[in-house]
Image: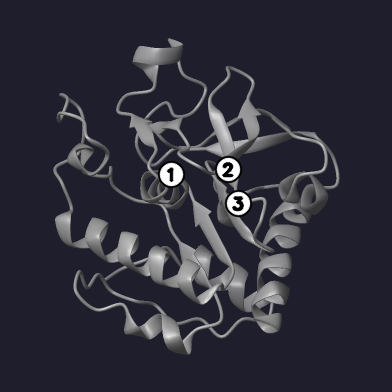
Amino acid sequence: ALIPWNYVNKLQQAGASVVILPPDADHHEAIARLDGLVMAGGADIEPARYGAEHQEGTDKPRVERDASELGLYRAAREKNIPVLGICRGLQIMAVAHGGSLHQHLPDVVGNTLHRDAPGTFNDHGATFMAGSLIADLVGETEVIVNSSHHQAVNSPGDLTITGHAEDGTIEVCEDMDAEFVLGVQWHPEFSSNEAISENIFSAFVKACAKS
């Protein structure tokens, strides 16, 4: 079970004691001992999870990981602890809330801003809803973010969309009734904007300390 060190490093710098949970489709009891949940980026979610047929170009299903993260997210919401979803993590949140995904973003928005090739990042503009958690954390409503994805949220289910990329792609979703349930489509753990990155991770850890 591997995860890029940047996730761990950013959380540790913000004061968290980090526990990595490998995929386990049937057991989510660890949530009872945690103060918050971060869901990292990674492979595409199985389209059947949101009622769609598998399209060419979508990754081979990671059935165990999908089941594990959906279960952990639901358990975290039941416990009412903070959640931060990053890239795939945002997409897991949307699917858990009854939403759906675009399986290949260039088919929807044309020449995508969001990734030139796997493993690379593109900088692009994003606009946030005034009064949202993400706008409060960032301190402004228009910023540059860094993306690396070919899928995106189509419908957020019963989450609230609070940010869009400049091409209209959904960039942020939140549960406005929760203190901290936030999903971002970009990668703050790899961001060159240290202030934005620090604000997001520090606020998450502070929310965890209160949970």
Q: Amino acid at mark 2?
A: Cys
Q: Quadrant of the N terminus?
A: bottom left
Q: Secondary structure at mark 1?
A: helix
Badge nearest the viewer, 3 or 2: 3
Q: Quadrant of the C terminus?
A: bottom right
Spatial CA distance of label 3 from label 1 is: 11 Å
Marks 3,1: beta carbons within 8 A? no
Answer left or right for 44 relative to 210: left
Answer left or right for 65 relative to 101: left
Q: What is the number of the mark on residue 175?
A: 3
Q: Amino acid at mark 1?
A: Ala
> Exactly how many numbered labels are in the figure?
3
Q: Which residue is identified by label 1?
A: 94
Q: Does 193 appear above or below 143?
A: below
**Location of residue 82 (image quadrant):** bottom right
Q: What is the number of the mark on residue 123?
A: none
